[in-house]
Image (spheres, rainbow, N blue to C red):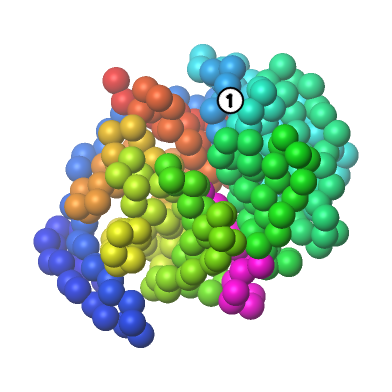
Amino acid sequence: MLRPQEGLRLVLAVAGLVMLLVAIAYAAPIGALKQSRVPTNNSGPRYITQGSDGNFWFTEGSPQGLAPGNVGRITPNGDITEFAVCASCFPNDIVQGPNDILYLTSNDPVLGRITTSGEVLPAIAMPNSLANGNGLTAHGDDIWIATFNVNSIWRYNISSGQFTEFPVPTAGAIAFDIAVDATGIVWFTEFGANQIGRLDPQTGVITETPVPGSPRGIAIATDGKVWFTERFSNAVGYLDPLTNAVTEILLAPGAGPEGIAAAPNGSLWVTQSSAGNIAQVTASGVIAESRRIKGSEPFGITVAPSGDPWYAELSANKIATLQLR
């Protein structure tokens, strides 16, 4: 592995994959860290998004089943309110949709809903009882869902109330996370197949691009590049939609990148679950980190319009924000 101080750039060609390997340079720790404890013990906060009400909403998906299935709301000042969304499910990802309604996935084959006023709406059953949801995202009137048991991408249209299924070509791909770019193209990670998927909603055609590791989180940068994390390869990377070239950035040993979110300034913020902190990454490989909190396990992340990242600390049972100014 390249050391952080090295400035070497390598060009690799592996099984038809054109990949740039970029060395990294670290800056000193940045920002003021603010943490807020989730009231329910062992709640397992996982993913977080900014709501249309200006607050941040997060899922509580304790994998040990030690806590009820809650969604939490945290104000910019750090005040947390929890809402029970199910009796025994484990909420997973969450996204803000139209009409002040947030949508969430869980280990149940449904699309959960809660309004920004805290009203839990009836969950919408998936057409397939095995379609448990991983990542999801919203684009216009569509909610896009990555599912793993049925190896498909699903679209739920809010206006029509109809689902459309798009089967992933590679068997056992394990669609993990999903994002939509400015042109409406849907991108998703294939954790089980070491690929990035591209779905054209107009034609229904899915194309796949190999990447070196098992991709998990995905985000679209302001320049349109498709970024992803590889927790178990200890790397982040991006795919250029214009050339299909993949660039890989190896992180310092023990980082464990998981969640990823685009910032307004063109950089990306990544949760380093194993290291216990978050990192800002640029395409040139410059990285700035927050201070590390051992055992906190940062997981899902979002970036406020101000540029400050907010994230869930899965093992610390806290929601954190890094105040940059």
The stretch drawn in magenta includes residue 171: yes
Question: What residue is at 63 percent from the left and 41 percent from the top?
Answer: 142
Q: Which residue is mark 1?
A: 51
In this rendering, position of residue 2 left or right of residue 71 = left
Using the image, determine if residue 16 lies above or below residue 37: below
In this rendering, position of residue 149 left or right of residue 313 = right
Residue type indicated by callout 1: Gly
Question: What residue is at 81 percent from the left and 51 percent from the top?
Answer: 126
| Crowd tier of the residue under label 1, counting other residues whose Cα lies within 10 Å: few below 14, some 14–19, many 20 or above | many
Closer-to-camera residue (19/287): 19
Residue 183 picture location, percent across and down = 43, 45
Which residue in the rendered view is the most extreme toward the left?
Answer: 7
Quarter of the rendering occupied by the C terminus: top left
Residue 94 picture location, percent across and down = 63, 39
Question: What residue is at 14 percent from the left and 58 percent from the top?
Answer: 5
Quarter of the rendering occupied by the N terminus: bottom left
Q: Is residue 149 visible?
A: yes
The magenta region covers 167-179
The stretch drawn in magenta includes residue 121: no
Using the image, determine if residue 37 lies above or below residue 263: above
Using the image, determine if residue 322 lies above or below residue 43: above
Question: What residue is at 24 percent from the left and 68 percent from the top?
Answer: 20
Residue 185 picture location, percent across and down = 48, 52
Closer-to-camera residue (232/105): 105
In this rendering, position of residue 27 left or right of residue 55 = left
